[in-house]
Amino acid sequence: MPYTAEEARMIAMPDDDYMSTEQLDFFRQRLLEEKTQVEEHLREVRDAMASHERDSDELDQAAFEEELRLQLRQADRETRLLANIEEALRRIDSGDYGYCEETGEPIGIPRLLLRPTARLCLEAKERQEQQENHYRKARGEG
């Protein structure tokens, strides 16, 4: 995925500038924009659910219920994303943004560009996923 000029500039900044005011402002703006988009989509889903009239046709009703189920799953994911965005904004305010919660090491600009809500560096995230896979296999889920 090609970077925008502003993203490329963030990546090109020297290590000494990691989580400088300029970078924090960049990520704050990106998180606020994503928050607005998620909130708008959640509003649209709520409005669509509220405006649906129960249809007497069983096939139409079944199709609506399947669509509703998918929208509710998406809304659940977006609600969790919204909480993660708000938590990332709190980390910006507290000065912890951009640093791994597990190791204290920098998460890195490229990873934050892909996932601005990241709380773990790549190595810690990979360890976490390996542990989760191990536990799932141990319980017979995978």
Image: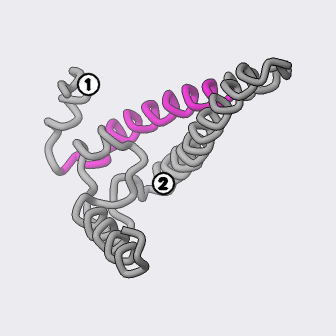
Horizontal relation, residue 118 to residue 6: left or right? right
Residue name at image x 27 percent, y 55 percent: 107
Horizontal relation, residue 71 to residue 105: left or right? right
For label 2, count other residues whose C-alpha is less than 10 Å away and answer few (under 14), some (14-19) or many (20+): some
- Please give the residue where the numbered disc 1 appears in the rendered image: 6
Q: Nearer the viewer, residue 54 or 128?
A: 54
Residue name at image x 42 percent, y 59 percent: 96
| Residue sitting farthest toward the bottom | 138
Residue name at image x 40 percent, y 53 percent: 97
Residue name at image x 33 percent, y 36 percent: 22
| Image coords of residue 105 (percent x, y) | 26, 65
Chief secondary structure of the magenta portion: helix
Q: Which residues are magenta?
A: 16-43
Horizontal relation, residue 142 to residue 62: left or right? left
For label 1, count other residues whose C-alpha is less than 10 Å away and answer few (under 14), some (14-19) or many (20+): few
- Please give the residue where the numbered disc 2 appears in the rendered image: 91
